[in-house]
Image: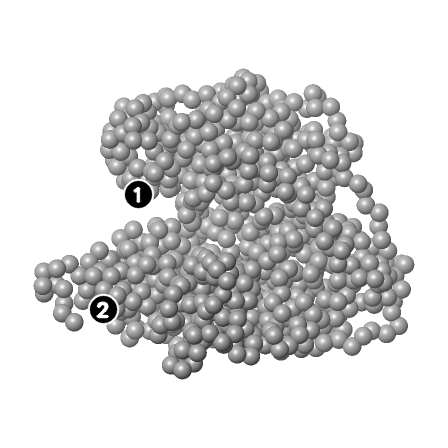
Amino acid sequence: MENPASTGEPGLFHEVVFYVVESDKLTREQATKVKKTLLEHGAIEAEHRTDPDNKTPFDPLEVTHVIAADVDFPGQLEVEEAMKAIVTPAWVETSVAKKRLAHVRLFTPDPKLFFSGVIVTIAELPVGDKEAICGGILAMGGQYSTNLTKLTTHIVALNMDNEKCTQAVAKKVQAKIVLPHWFDDCLKLNRRIDEAPYLLPNPEIERLHSTEPLPIPRGPDLTYTHASIAEKPPNPRPNFKVFSGKKVCLGTDLDISQGLRSVISTIIEEAHGEITDNILDAHVYVGQWREGTDYVTASRKGCDVGNLTWLYWMFAHGKWTNPMKRLLHYPLVRNGIPGMRNLLITVSNYGGDARLYLESLIVASGATFTKSMKAENTHLITAREHSEKCTAAKEWNIHMVNHLWIEESYAKWQVLTVTDPKYTHFPTRTNLMEVVGQTQICPRTIQQFYDVSDDVDMASDDGNSSALYHENPKEVVMSTMGGGDVPTLPKPRGRPPKTLKLPPQEFSTPRNKTTTGSDTSSVITTGGRRAKEAATQRLHELAPDIALYEKEMKRKGSGLWGATKRQSLTPGEHRPDKKRAASSAEPDLTADEEGDINMGEAKPKKTKKRVKPTIRVLVTGYTWKDEVTEKRKLAEIGIQCISEPSADCTHLAAPKIVRTEKFLCALAHAPTILSTSWIESCLESGHLVDESAHILSDPDGEAKMEIKLSESLVRAKKLKGTLLEGTVVYCTPNVTGGFDTYSHIVQANGGICINFKTGKRGANTPEDMSGKLVLLSSDAAADQKLWKPFVALAKGLHAEPLIYRTDWLLTAAMRQKVEYDDGYLLPQKKK
């Protein structure tokens, strides 16, 4: 092929600046071949950086494409944060073959797009089914082809009696012919499962009943992904250089002997790393818990933070891995997830390392793992719907879910509802052990553990005392650091959402009407938002009754295993053992059950009828003693605790005036603002108490923030959430607390907030903005680079550019009054 450079024409990749990441799946020889192809077609290779202070070996802002076989490489989050493409080498080959740049989405190695690399054609399916399958494939990174080609990987058909299947067999096309059920099951689970049971001409799912025995699959390699690790670390592979140039800090909270600490230190030093006791010098921090000064400092500083299991995994596999890729590679939390403590969970149909992994995950979540299953158990995690434990669980009314429920609850750090169909779906001839361990830690979720400052008002960017107050570690603190021992938190990882999410609601289930943390919130566009919120909320209120009705309809006749039907219990309730009669003989169990069913009679309990909620209260800055139990008690007397501010929020409860996201967003709707002493009084008395004695009064807070809360409420009632209506507010990426925080405050007050990280006008910005245009910014160097483009943008829109500290928005939301004051200008922009 003629080199485009020799003809004077720009090459195919002339706008591409690339970096190739070598790995086990992309060897040096393969990487060299890819580089050669790119360079021959006009691409530019990014400069390789060796400075250990850089998390990536290249500048994420400089590159346009990162070529990698998977997304598990140093700096992957930084690349995604910079919105740069990560593609497989196949993207280069396909682009050259087609003589045009292929779409990057079809070649992503991101496991979340699990149909990436799948090219499908469909044979003689109804139009509706065909469109549904095509939509799912495209959404999950796959491709659809109208015709059968050499590149086709899957043919979807109901039988072999069609032209495409006949042609594929005759021409020996290397494509799998599958039933459409495979795509349906993959999309329901949000995971790619094995096609084998769905392969035509003789699919297993049509030959064998779901109750037929199914061998336990080999599953993924889960060694060194759970807490059951050996005392002695594994011997590293030859040429182990994961820590080359890096300084590693071993946390003081690691429960290991001095001898083992010395052995680990020696391995790290032999891998060209350096051990340091000063966390401020470290690039890597290894600790046991998500707490302590070292953990907070390392996290805010942007170090790689993992635990001993993560370290051992790298020793054993001889390569670097992101500690957030595997749930138990990141430091744990003492006492686990709030709401998990009273849950008793057992496991079925999982074996080997997968079973050990789930046992460790259950304990890390704060629940109790039981090897045997009793009537007191609250949940059964199973890879299939059939086993002795599964049969007993149905009779005893025990929640039966797959492993995705516990994994995603841990990843999102909240007890997710078991009514989500994803968690109760079991493909008939698939053991879900084959997809265990694929869930990753959510970077935004763990931010709550290090971006907090309990009971402390933190200094703002210019050293003034005005800042956001935060008391509850479940709420992200929106404050900036003016000094102190802990470095300022870098910007949150991930992209801002393009759509508006409905606030998650308190979602009850037939078994436990105080289950918290549902992931069933709906994603909606901004059009008709309030009507959709009201409709969705009504659906949330009806869902428990619908789920309970369906569950009752599925009940069978008399009890099995000598037990009566199990009644719904809250996690805090336990059955008395004294009236349980032990069975004289136990049934034969499958190999993985290990005699795990403990039979007996379960006595029903009477449950209180819940009062219809008349008060919807948002609580902020308050620490619950037992959140699940206390919220259940409040619900019983007609108080519904909501987790996010919304237009139908009637009350706001806080210990004092706090500048949290919840407080500021709720204030825009002018709710009744009470002290949290009202919550405590209601809990103590067991009924609604008079609100007038608990109206929030905080003279010190009002003086400090220079506001009058009563006046702010009067303005809010008049404005009805329109304080910033018609106002566009720009926000730089590095503001402390993250773009989403300020976006939510602006939206709650009727405005539009745009992430200003490209130096270009947002799509929602009017052509003419005569007046004032505000950019919320930090004084970070990366943000300062955006000031000049913003000034040019404002002038082009005939507006006066104002580059303010975030305090401008926080004060406006708190006062419910917009004031343009030079006091909010960043120091470099003051006149």
Q: Residue at x 75, y 63 (%)?
A: 393
Q: CA distance from mark 2 to mark 1?
A: 30 Å
Residue 27 appears in which quarter of the rendering? bottom left
Above or below, 435 against 605 in this view is below
Above or below, 441 against 713 in this view is below
- Residue tagged by mark 2? 37
Q: Does residue 370 appear anywhere in the picture?
A: yes
Where residue 288 appears, x then y in whole percent?
A: 55, 57
Q: Residue at x 73, y 55 (%)?
A: 551
Left/right placement of residue 487 relative to residue 217 reads left
Left/right placement of residue 694 relative to residue 776 reads right
Q: Residues within 10 Å of mark 1 (few under 14, many from 20)?
A: few
Residue 758 tag number: 1
Element type at mark 2: helix
Residue 70 appears in which quarter of the rendering? bottom left
Left/right placement of residue 199 relative to residue 594 reads left
Amino acid marked by disc 2:
Thr
Taking depth in this image into account, of 499 and 254 the one nearest to the observer is: 499
Where residue 555 appears, x then y in whole percent?
A: 78, 59
Q: Residue at x 33, y 31 (%)?
A: 766
